[in-house]
Image: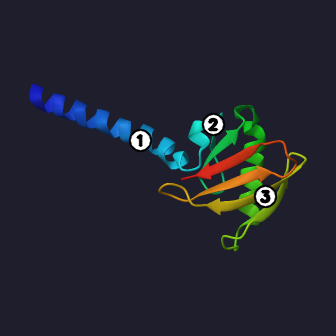
Amino acid sequence: MRSIARGTAAALAGVAVLCLWAPVQAVAGSDAARSSAAYCGPDKATGLAVWADPADSCATALQVASAYAKARSGTARAPVTVRADGGTWTCQERQGDPNPYQECVDTGGSGRRVVLSS
């Protein structure tokens, strides 16, 4: 009985590690993991994880993600321009390592960006 409990505990620990590791791996290809990006939560329309860079702009990042989800419906991988939080953002799909992700960059030169990943 004790060996079954240990085996179950080890399996659950392994699953927890995989679940916690997956979002970091998905964003690693976008360089968000190496920057000051912060996880802001999922986009309500797409369910994609939304990351804000810099970390203190989560409210804006969620607005940008929502605007991008609405604007990109029906478009292929072409860049999309959206307006959110008083700014203009250029968004497009990028190839990550290994999975693609979406990135929106503030065209006003502020250096702000939003990353959406699965």
Q: Are marks 3 and 1 in contact (CB under 8 Å)?
A: no
For the residue pair 106 and 44, the one nearer the viewer reads as 106
Residue 35: assigned label: 2
Where does label 1 land, which residue? 19
Q: Position of residue 22 (x, y in %)?
A: 45, 45
Q: Write the residue at 63% across / 36% down.
A: 35
For mark 1, does the 10 Å Cα neighbourhood hold few (<14), some (14 to 19), or many (20 or more) residues? Answer: few
- Separation of marks 2 and 1 at Cα, in angstroms: 22 Å
Q: Is residue 113 left or right of residue 96?
A: right
Could you tell me the amino acid type at mark 3?
Answer: Thr
Could you tell me which secondary element the residue under label 1 belongs to?
Answer: helix
Q: Amino acid at mark 1?
A: Cys
- Pick the quarter of the image with the N terminus: top left
Q: Secondary structure at mark 2?
A: loop
Please name which of the two marks, 3 or 2, marks the residue nearer to the observer.
Answer: 2
Residue in the picture at 70% in, 39% down: 53
Q: Is residue 12 above or below residue 94?
A: above
> Residue 19 placed where, x, y %?
41, 41
Which quadrant holds residue 6?
top left
Between disc 2 and disc 1, the foreground one is 2
Label number found at residue 57 = none
According to the image, label 3 marks what residue?
Answer: 90
Q: Earlier in the sequence, mark 3 or mark 2?
A: 2
User: Where does residue 34 sit, x and y in percent of width and height?
Assistant: 58, 37
